[in-house]
Amino acid sequence: MNKQELIRQIQEKKTFLCVGLDTDIKKIPQHLLTEEDPIFAFNKAIIDATAAYCVAYKPNLAFYESMGVKGWVAFEKTIKYLNEHYPNHFIIADAKRGDIGNTSAMYARTFFEEMNLDALTVAPYMGEDSVTPFLQYPGKWVILLALTSNKGSQDFQLTCNAEGERLFEKVLRKSQEWSNDENMMYVVGATQGRMFEDIRRIVPNHFLLVPGIGAQGGSLEEVCKYGMTKDCGLLVNSSRAIIYADKSEAFAEVAAAEAKKVAEQMAALLG
Amino acid sequence: MNKQELIRQIQEKKTFLCVGLDTDIKKIPQHLLTEEDPIFAFNKAIIDATAAYCVAYKPNLAFYESMGVKGWVAFEKTIKYLNEHYPNHFIIADAKRGDIGNTSAMYARTFFEEMNLDALTVAPYMGEDSVTPFLQYPGKWVILLALTSNKGSQDFQLTCNAEGERLFEKVLRKSQEWSNDENMMYVVGATQGRMFEDIRRIVPNHFLLVPGIGAQGGSLEEVCKYGMTKDCGLLVNSSRAIIYADKSEAFAEVAAAEAKKVAEQMAALLG
């Protein structure tokens, strides 16, 4: 999906919500455990219930990989289901990959060619040749980690270089030499508050993928105040607060109600 | 496997070779494609042929993931085979993971509890809480990316901070607050030459995992000259130069001969 299409989806649906499919077999409703593939059954129900209130889905691969082969089967079925039934939703694999060129190229082939995902999160530590193999696919996106939502973001991302530039700022600046706002977004945690101002000075037009509202405590209002552009420029993710809002047989309806609540806040913030 | 056991294996076998199982369906001998699981058949043959000349195996997960579910099946079979038949070999999943705490914890459970791997490569960008969940398992290791073998290592890893410390040096120094030389190693590319001197000033006793000899052009002699400790302190990886040395039916024998050649150089360098 290209940038114009994504902006149009946001404008039409008046939401910039991304629902995080961090599906954990230990947290899904008990009654689903009798299903042939409980993880896929859960995802399908959550997707069908929330699709009207979001523009994107983001399965975090760690949750699927932690279940081994079964997890990969559920992941692939989920992506196939999204591609077939919700072609207007933007699909992000939260994978945080990044390896030497030939290895990154293999990841790119898997996620973009075979699975037809729209975007992949990538870690910047290994630099240009670990990122550029992902940029060869029109309409596909790299979402580069810039300033993450966790406490450990302070350990290296905020390190100031001799020129007074912090590492996340260098990542934002340097990566623009390889890419543009039609094929790259950045991960910025909702917990970073006013730092969005600093980020917008360097990337005024890029989309940002923002995790960390809900369970991690970030504020949607603050993110919008300091991070929103005229085209919105934000995909704000919520995982646990939506998908695990309820564990009864009504879990999907409750998830829909939670997603709707966030979408209504978003509609107001879009103005 | 703990540090003393690893050192003993190196001393007994007079080799510190790690064979990289970067198995690509497009590069394995044609005659294996008729096997039920060509990837596992290839790995099994390579492992049986090279086990005498190495102390470690390192499958790079990207190669397996790029084949989807089939790839994961082959990966799990390979790990199971290694655990059952070669319990004295050190098994590294080259995964370059790193995510927020609860996600890293799920990865740790998968790789250390379920698969019984010895070590996992981890990217440092997200800081302490993305790494520490992997450090809770006795005898298991984090191998943190420090100074990688690729060209892109220059983009961020060499960035000097206001105190004159380069990012990879800060990673080495800071991570010692969370770990020690019994549960952490560092990735340092063989292509980095004399930089090993700088690294040894900060981590004089840690093991280093060194990719980049062979196809990537690093020098084994130089790595040993500047990076070896009295306990060896090195696991030097070779992938393509060994496993794809030949594509005929004799591929495993040729791989064994290549591994033996490297092991003989290593024996001489161990003195």
Image (cartoon, coloured by chain):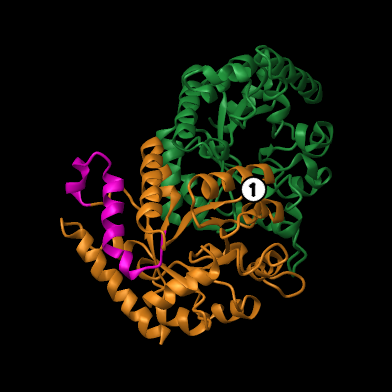
Chain colours: A green, B orange
Q: Is residue A195 left or right of residue B186?
A: right
> Which region of the structure is painted magenta?
B29-57
The residue singled out by tag 1 in the image is: A145
Residue A226 location (% of width, % of height): 82, 39
Q: Residue at 55% across / 21% down in the picture?
A: A33
The chain letter for the residue carrying disc 1 is A
Q: Quadrant of residue A197?
A: top right
Q: Is A35 left or right of A3, judged from the image as shown?
A: left
Q: Element under label 1? A: strand
Looking at the picture, tell me which residue is in the foreground, A2 or B150.
B150
Q: Do we see residue A240 in this rendering?
A: yes
**Could you tell me residue B95's position as x and y percent?**
50, 52
Most common secondary structure along the magenta stretch: helix
Magenta stretch: includes residue B270? no
Q: Is residue B191 visible?
A: no
| Amino acid at dot 1 | Leu
